Structures are given as structure tokens and as C-alpha cells.
Amino acid sequence: MINFELNTKYNFVFAGVLPNKISYSIILSVIYGSKSDYIVGINNPSEYLIELVSTKELIYEIDEESLSHFALAKFPCEILDANEILTNLFSSEYVKLRNVNIEIKINELTKFTGSVDPLSIVFNKTDLILSCSFKPDTYILNETDTWLNNVINYEPIGVNLNNNKILLTEFVTRIYKIVKNNIVLTSINNWIFNGVDNNNNPPVIVAENFAGLFVDERLFGYYNNNSFICNGITNYGDLIKQLAFTFGCITGMISSNQAIFVPFIDSNKPAKTIDENCLINKKIEGNRDIISFLVFNPGGNYLGTPTNIQGKYLTKEIFTSFFINTVNGFLPVSQINTKYSWEEFLAGVLNYWGSYFMRKKYIFNYTFEVTGIDYNLWEDIIINNVKYTPVYVKINFEEFKTEIKAVKLE
């Protein structure tokens, strides 16, 4: 047994070697007390009859239910806890569940960090199995308010009250810094944005790429005199989801210090070719119906034929207020790419998502089981010269294989 000392962090380390000499370690840490003054590593938990029996899987997925396109990660597991050591720790009054964490390393590179989900904890005395799931660190964004008592909650993102315009990439980075202060953002978007500078005669079209876009830091509401009016975004998790959908992107943390904001659909997206010899199994299934009516708010702009048939229409909220910085000040973005003639920014976004939700390719999921673990949710795959975009990636690093659910976009 273990005699736990207060204010101590305990590490339970499960390690192994995969094919191709790939090493992995799973570190379960628990702070016993209000703070950790030092760490006690338990490098051989099996001595205490604690074993990670299943599942050594890491799951990335796009939230298809809400179609928010937020890259999630979770780690479900079952632990043999024969002496109920972990079970008693989890339920101890001296342990806060947010201080029960897991870190997954592959070849010493941290792939996932997260805290235990209290609603997932189950201990079964019959087989002495402790089941639980670890939610990603980004979950803290869902618990961080964008506004409090009718006042914008500026503190989490360090807003400068005297300057309400900020580069969009910097704004996204600051949101992820709520999770980890040393975060690095990888952002990709090939759209070109246009604004009209009416300070010239005749007016001049000004073009800018994604990296040069600015956004108002008060994106989740506005002030009417001295009253703050919320637009429905109440936490930073919902804010980053809506931002990603607005730009046709997926977003999330892919390691302990790296976040992504990259396209869901893009012909220039990185793609990995999978040799047919690596293909263990393939399954095709129809999971949804084609959307025939797509509505974007604000404004109610739509594509398709209006209908009240549930499952045939989709209503989504997007942001429409972005800016280009010029010598004559900030210009509102009015178009995406020159091929769109609508005056509003959202016209381009409607066309982008309409080509997905309102086409046959939206119906089917293709599930591939492949050897290896070097696959990503944010990277397309090519099998037999056909490109697919993943919506779900389950990495089983003990069995050295990956399950990929994807949609075919070509």
C-alpha cells in the first residue's frame, strides 16, 4: 500500500515499446492536497496491483452533432485497481478531480494532456476495474466566461481596453493561452478577403489574406451606451468553435503546446498517401441525409429551397465583422475572393459550406482501419488515388493501428 502525504503530486507511469521501436508512456498524476510541493514517481504501478488494461487509445474527432468543427481529443481507459488505491484517491476529500491528470507521450513527444471527467468515473468491485475518461485541457475554455455581470470578461485574454482591434490570429492565440501560456498556433487559410476603401476617388478594392485580418475583441457582444449586449456567446469554447466554422476550419489543441486553426475542406491541405498493404479493413455507411436548406445568421442568408422538414435544413450562426487595416484606417471585409459578388462576407462562407452539406458526398462515412499510428485529424488521406477528409481518428498505440472515419470530397 501507499501512505500518501499531503501536498504531494504522485505520478503513476505506464510505459512500453511499440513496433518500429516507438516508445510510449502514459503518466497518470494525482495531487494529494491543495498543492504539489514535490513529485513522487511510481514507475512500476503493477507492484501495487495497478495496471492499465484498456484502452490505450487516443481519440480525435469533429463534433458532427453540433457541426461546430472543433477538434476534440479524449482518452478513455480501464485500470485494474485491485487494492482500490486509485479509486480511494479519486474520491478522497484531499483530491480535486481537476488535479487528476494524464499525459501521453510517444517517442517522448507529448501528444495529449487532460484531466479526468468526473461523470465518467466508475469502479466495479466485482472485477476491480476503474473506468474513466480524460477530457482535453481545452475543456477549460467551456468553463471560462466571455462576460460577467453585464461586463466583458477581458482578463482571460489580456484585452487592451484602448485598442479594440486585434489580429485575428493573435486573438485565437490568446484564447488558447487560457489553456497553456506557451501555446503555439498553426493557422492555414487560403481565402483572399476584400474591402472597399471609399477614401479614394474612385473607390479602391483592398485585398488581404487571412494572416492580415483584424477582429474586434468584443466579438461576443457590444455596448449600447453603458449596457453590454451579449450575442449569445457566453464562453470562450463556443467563441472559438464559431470562429472556426466561420472560416471553414477545424481547431483545437493537438499537443501540450500546439493548437491548430486549419481548413476542413481545402484542395491544398496536406495529405498522407496510405499504401494498400497498410489497409486492414474498409467500411462504407450512410449516416445522414443531404441538407436541402442552409441558413446562416445574422441576416438569414440562405441557400437551397426553404423547408420545415427536420433533418433537411440547417441553421448556423457565424461571425461577419472582420477588418483590413489600411493607411486610411480599418475597412470592413465585404467579400471573400473576387469570384463572389454578394456584398456581405457571409456569401462566401455560405457557398463554401453549401458545397459540402448540400452534396451527396456529405451522406457517407468511410471507415478505414490501417496499420501505424502516424495519422492526424487535420491531414487528408489518399487511398487508391482517392482523397478523404477525416472526421474521426482513433489511435491504438498498443496494437499499432488506427481507425479513421472520413468523408470523400472529390
Image (cartoon, rainbow, N blue to C red):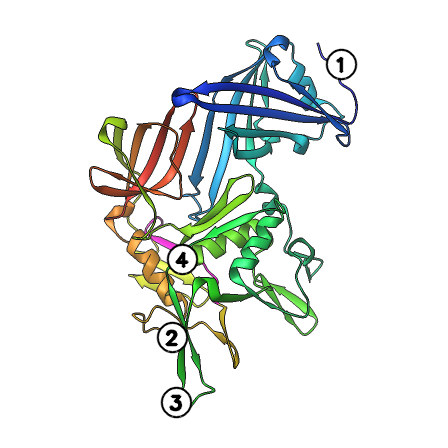
Q: Amino acid at mark 1?
A: Asn
- Which residue is labeled 1 in the image? 3
Q: Are marks 4 and 3 in contact (CB under 8 Å)?
A: no
Query: Residue lying furthest left in this view?
Result: 384
Q: Amino acid at mark 4?
A: Asn
- Mark 4 or 2, which is nearer the eye? 4
Q: Amino acid at mark 3?
A: Pro
Q: Where does the image place residue 27, in percent across and percent down from the top left?
A: 59, 25
Mark found first going from the N terminus, 4 or 2: 4
The span from disc 3 to disc 2 (Cα, nearest Å) is: 18 Å
| Other residues around mark 3 within 10 Å, as few (<14) / some (14–19) / many (≥20) | few
Q: Residue at x 61, y 45 (%)?
A: 179
| Other residues around mark 4 within 10 Å, as few (<14) / some (14–19) / many (≥20) | some
Secondary structure under tag 1 reads loop
Secondary structure under tag 4 reads loop
Q: Residue at x 20, y 37 (%)?
A: 384
- Which residue is labeled 2 in the image? 343
In the drawing, what numbered circle is on residue 189?
4
- Which residue is labeled 3 in the image? 202
Q: Residue at x 33, y 59 (%)?
A: 352
Residue 313 magenta-highlighted: yes
